[in-house]
Structures are given as structure tokens and as C-alpha cells.
Image: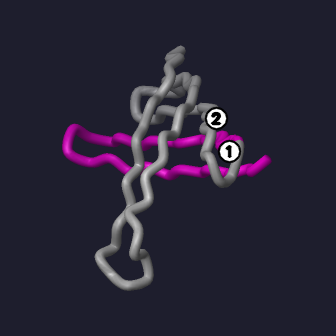
Amino acid sequence: MLFGWTARLQRYDDNTVATPIVDEQFIPGIFVQDEWLISPVWTLLGGLRLDHYNRHGLIFAPRLAAKWKPSTWTTLRANLVQVFEW
């Protein structure tokens, strides 16, 4: 099981007249995730993430990922993420 926190500074500027001001915001967050080895070739990863945006408030994002690795050079991943805004 992995726990952690993030501290990101997001800077947005698309260099057009649509955004005359560079937008910067600090985005703190926390997360937890765990990985389960189902078989020698199948792995599942589940996780929860909570970020705080100044304009949007709290954003909760659970995720589930499956990985199939039949050989050393072949990997296929499928990810599901659902975002909830409060």
C-alpha cells in the first residue's frame, strides 16, 4: 500500500489572446493506492486521490487499473477513473 501527498504548481498560458493573463495555482493533494498480483501475468491497481483547486474546491478521483503482461516486451493496460467535484 502506498500513501502520499502532492504539491503542484500549475501554470497555464496558451500564448493567445484568449488567455491574456498567465494562470497559476497551487494544487495540494493526497492519495492512497494498492497493487494486487492476481496471477503471473495479471495485476490490478486501485487508488483514491483528493485534490484541492482554488476555483473548483475538492476533487475526489477513485481509479482502477488492470495490467496484462504476457511477455517481457508486451504490456496492455486498461484504466478507469471517475471524477467527483464538491
Q: Earlier in the sequence, mark 2 or mark 1?
A: 2
Other residues around mark 2 within 10 Å, as few (<14) / some (14–19) / many (≥20): some
Report the residue that reaches farthest toward the front: 21
Q: Name the residue located 60 percent from the left edge and 32 percent from the top edge.
A: 46
The quadrant where residue 41 appears? top left
Which contiguous range is marked in magenta? Answer: 58-86
Give yes or no for residue 72 being in the magenta stretch.
yes
Report helix, strand or loop for mark 1. Answer: strand
The quadrant where residue 71 appears? top left
Q: Name the residue located 50 percent from the left edge and 17 percent from the top edge.
A: 2
The residues bearing labels 2 and 1 have C-alpha atoms spaced at a distance of: 6 Å
Instruction: Identify the residue under disc 1.
Output: 59
Is the Cβ of the residue at disc 2 closer than 8 Å to that at disc 1?
yes
Residue 39's place in the image compared with 71, above or below, is above
Report the residue that reaches farthest toward the bottom: 17
Q: Name the residue located 60 percent from the left edge and 51 percent from the top edge.
A: 80
User: Looking at the picture, how far across and down is residue 33, in whole percent?
Assistant: 56, 25
Q: Name the residue located 27 percent from the left edge and 48 percent from the top edge.
A: 74
Amino acid residing under circle 2: Leu
Residue 49's place in the image compared with 84, above or below, is above
- Going by the image, does 10 lie left or right of 15? right
Instruction: Identify the residue under disc 2.
Output: 50
Amino acid residing under circle 1: Ile
- Going by the image, does 62 lie left or right of 86? left
User: Looking at the picture, how far across and down is residue 22, in whole percent?
Assistant: 38, 63
Report the residue that reaches farthest toward the right: 86
Give yes or no for residue 84 being in the magenta stretch.
yes
Tag of residue 67: none
Residue 71's place in the image compared with 11, above or below, is above
Most foreground residue, 61 or 36: 61
